[in-house]
Image (cartoon, grey):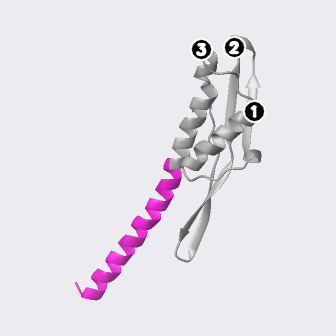
Amino acid sequence: MSKARIIITVALLALLVAFGWQVGACYVANLQLQDDLQDLAAQVGTRIGLDPVKSDEDLRASIIRKAESHDIVLRPDQITVRHTGSGDDAVTYLSADYTARVNLLRYSFNLHFTPSSSRR
């Protein structure tokens, strides 16, 4: 095998690894945000009386902070907060709708994610 072929093969493998790394990082961050949404929707502290009931704005602010910790940029209008039921039967539904941009040299594309607090 010639040296040129080895260099080209190594360069292509490096590009594939870099591409896979960026795409994989986006999917892992999305899964982490989905876990955070499920935790926030459970509102365990509120159910056992340790925390006051959070307003929709408080929940949105919490989601934005959690998303930032995963390098996801969200605006309040990208977050849905819904409440159903009341009292002990109350259920909070949280979701976000965002795109993540993947750049690799001159090629780039968007990945669309919609994590939510509902179990799938």
Q: Position of residue 51 (x, y in %)?
A: 63, 21
Give how far apart the Cα atoms at labels 1 and 3 are.
19 Å
Identity of the residue drawn at 67% across and 51% down: 98
Task: Tell me: residue 81, above or below residue 79.
Answer: above
Magenta stretch holds residue 83: no
Mark closer to the chain start, 1 or 2: 1
Instruction: For residue 119, say whether it is visible.
Output: no
The tag on residue 17 is none
Q: Position of residue 66 (x, y in %)?
A: 59, 42
Image mark for residue 56: 1
Mark 3 / mark 2, whichever is N-terminal: 3
**Screen quadrant of the C terminus:** top right
Q: CA distance from mark 1 to mark 2?
A: 18 Å
Q: Nearer the viewer, residue 13 or 100?
A: 100
Left or right: 19 as drawn, with respect to 13: right
Q: Which residue is mark 2?
A: 89
At a point 62% along the width and 44% down the height, the residue shown is: 65
Q: Left or right: where does residue 54 sit relative to residue 10?
A: right
Give the vertical position of 48 relative to 97 (above or below): above
Which label number is shown at residue 48? Answer: 3
Q: Residue 68 at what x, y percent from top left?
A: 59, 49
Element on which disc 3 rests: loop
Viewer-nearest of discs 3 and 2: 3
**Which residue is located at x 60 percent, y 52 percent?**
72
Q: Main secondary structure of the magenta part?
A: helix
Residue 101 in the figure: left or right of residue 21: right
Secondary structure of the residue carrying numbered label 2: helix
- Taking the view exactly as shown, the residue that stands out farthest to the top is 88
Q: Quadrant of residue 106?
A: bottom right
Q: Disc 1 on helix, strand or loop?
A: helix
Q: Earlier in the sequence, mark 1 or mark 3?
A: 3
The span picked out in magenta is 1-28
